[in-house]
Amino acid sequence: MSIRQWVGAAVLGGLCIAAPANAATPQRVQVTGEIIDTWCHVTEIMYALGTAHHKCAVWCAAGGIPVGIKGDDDKVYMVLKIEGDDTSVANPKVLKIQTHQVTVNGDLYERDGVNYLIVNQVADDKGVVNMTHEDYGIQPFGE
Amino acid sequence: MTRHSILAAAAALALTAGPALAAEGWGIDHEQETRIEAKVVDLLCEVSGDCTENCGNGKRQLGLLLDDGRLVPVVKNFDIFAGATADLLPFCGKRVTADGLLISNPKMPMFALQFKREGTDGKWSRANWFGKAWSKANGGKKAGAWYKHDARVLETLKASGVYGIPGLKPSE
C-alpha cells in the first residue's frame, strides 16, 4: 500500500467515527444533587428518590437505564461520561454510588430539553443521605 | 392504592402482556404513543463529538436523531427495569422505525421503546433484547425477574444494603 493509499484509508477511517456537525460547545458547571435512575424519577411511575428507591435504582442502572443527577436546582441531568469513563450503560462504578448525594464538576450540553452531563470530577460524595424509606417503604414492591 | 402503585401495577401488566405490533400506553404523564422514523445515534458522540466505533459497542447510551434534527434519548425498552441499548445497538448509524412512548416531560423528554424495525420495511421485533442478552450471558436462565438474580445487583446490594446505607435494614 502506498503512502497515498495509507493516508486515504486513515482519512476514511476517521470519517467513520467523525464528530457530528452539530456537536455543541459545553457549559462548565458544578452540580450538587442525588444520583438517580432517570426513568423512575422522571416518569414518577413510583417514588424514586432516596433510601426508599435505592434497590430499584440499582436494578435500573444494572439494566442499562440512564443514570442521572437530580440537582438541588431541581433539574435532571443525564450522565454520559464520568471521570474519563465513557461507559454509561450499567457502569459498575456508578452502581456503587446510586442514590448518593454528590457534587460534580462537568461539562453540560443542553439539547432539545435534555441536560446531558459529562462529569469530569466527583468533587464530593456524602453517600446516601436522603432518608425516604420511613415515608415510602421500599419501592416498588415493598420488600 | 396510591397513584404510584396504580401506575406501577399498570406498567407491570403492560410488561407481561402479549405482543401487539403497536405501542401501548402505560399511563405515564406526558406519554404519547408514537411511531417514528429516525437514525440511531450514540448520544455522547452526537452531543459532544466524543465518538467511537459502533456507538460504543453497548457501553454507551443511544438515542434517536429525528429528521427535523431533534435528538431524543431512548431510556427504556420492554423488559422490566431495563434500557434499550441492546435493542438499538445493531442499528447504530442506521435508520429505524421506533414504536413506543414519546414522553414529553419538561424535566427530561425521553422515549420508551416497545418495538423496532430497520428502516421502514424491516422485520418488526419486540424491544426485549436486554432480556435475551441477559439470558444468553447467564447460561440460558430465564430473564423474567433478572434483577433478582443478576450478579452485579446482588454484589452491589450486598455491600450497600437495600437502602444504600450499610447496616441499615428493614425492620422485621
Image (spheres, rainbow, N blue to C red):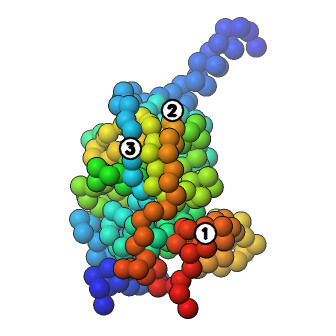
Position of residue B117 measured from the top left corner of the image (x, y, whole percent):
46, 59
Whichever of labels 1 and 2 marks the residue nearer the N terminus, that label is: 2
Read off the residue under disc 3: A31
Q: Secondary structure at mark 1?
A: loop
Q: Amino acid at mark 2?
A: Asp
**Gap in Å between the C-alphas at discs 3 and 2?**
21 Å
Position of residue A90 measured from the top left corner of the image (x, y, whole percent):
58, 57
Mark whose residue sits in front, 1 or 2:
1
Mark whose residue sits in front, 3 or 2:
3
Position of residue B53 measured from the top left corner of the image (x, y, whole percent):
60, 37
Marks 3 and 1 close (CB-CB < 8 Å): no
Q: Residue at x 39, y 52 (%)?
A: A33
Relative height, residue A115 to residue A62 (above, below):
above
Read off the residue under disc 1: B166
Q: Which mark is residue A73?
A: none
Relative height, residue A129 to residue A133 (above, below):
above
Mark whose residue sits in front, 3 or 1:
1
**Gap in Å between the C-alphas at discs 3 and 1?**
26 Å
The answer to whether residue B147 is visible is no
Read off the residue under disc 2: B50
Q: Amino acid at mark 1?
A: Pro
Judging from the image, mark 3 belongs to the subunit labelled A
